[in-house]
Amino acid sequence: MKTFLTIILLFSVLIPLGVQAQAVPPAPLYRDPITDGAADPCIVYNPAEKAWWMLYTQRRANVEAADVAYCYGNEIGIAYSEDNGRTWRYRGTLDLEFERGKNTFWAPDVVLHNGVYHMFVSYIQGVANHWSGRAVMMHYTSTNLWDWKHEGPVKLPKDDVIDATLIQLPNGNWRMWYKWDSKSLYADSKDLYTWTGDAKPAVSDEPHEGAKAFKFKGSYWFVTDEWRGMAVYKSSDLLNWKKQKERILETPSNRKDDYPSGSHGDVVVVGDKAYIFYFTHPGRRFHTKDYHDNNGNIPYEMRRSSIQVAELEVVDGELVVKDRDKPFHIYLPNT
């Protein structure tokens, strides 16, 4: 009987360890099976489906069109994970159109407040061949993450803005940072509908986009995409930011598609663990290095993008990704 109990006890320890050992995420973590252009991921838990969702810019990477037209006319794609963040499958797109025509949606961020999901997403009317168009920060609300009500444009101190990231302040209010003129500005709100701010940049030392604010290991962090890896800033009050010397995700790894650098990510903090989800242009030598063929198109290999994930750690007071080549476990709890 004692031997039998010992065996049961060993299995109770080894089985969870075995499950944990199976939770090493693949590389790439996700490729969009429809357009092959997944970028700008936003990770949110869907309690109704007991699954994690990844909302992302669904770039039209498999479309042959002039210059950067594949970055316009995008919908917001949905991937979902039923194994706690290890693997992801395509689910479809969100229905966000509120006016006629084919329009452009970029880089969503979603927060939950008083039982309602609020999404802030960059919107440009129409589809362009070249970088152009006036961007508007649009606000949507939902109770199930599928059906979204268009609340209208967000009134911010500046116009032509993209790339929202939000965090709830200690007093219960909300702060939104957004990109304007390659700087991060911020505004505050009590209810996520009315925003106030003075257009003073929070971070402006280097041009950037795709910022993400979060709290981890007792500090606030602000990660920005500098198109050659991500810069990292640290703060104790969400107002004064100190930049650390080293970027994260700046150099290639040996994992498939995990090069040349990591761009525009989201961070999920789970207890004493944090994971950064980001996208790469694996067909490029440098993130911003592309070229045009005789038709004026960027070749497919340089258009396509992949989603990756890495574990974040705090070492000697700095935020780092210690070794992207080393396998790690990921576990996003269903809560």
Image: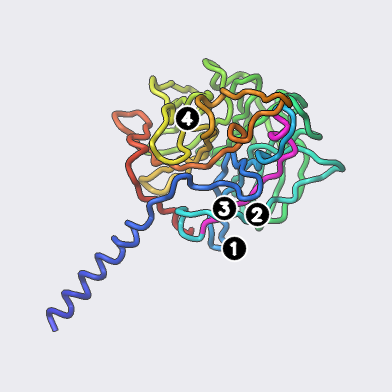
Cβ atoms at labels 3 and 4 below 8 Å apart: no
Pointer 1 residue: 48
Label 2 secondary element: loop
Nearer the observer, 146 or 238 = 146
Q: What is the number of the mark on residue 318?
A: none
Q: Classify mark 2: residues with Cα within 10 Å, few (<14), some (14-19) or many (20+).
A: many
Cβ atoms at labels 2 and 1 below 8 Å apart: yes
- At 41% across and 27% down in the image, what residue appears? 251
Q: Mark 3 or mark 1: which is in front?
A: 3
Q: Is residue 125 magenta?
A: no
Pointer 3 residue: 53
* N-terminal label among 4 and 2: 2
Q: Position of residue 7 (x, y in %)?
A: 18, 75
Q: Classify mark 1: residues with Cα within 10 Å, few (<14), some (14-19) or many (20+).
A: few
Q: Is residue 77 magenta?
A: yes
* N-terminal label among 2 and 3: 3
Pointer 2 residue: 145
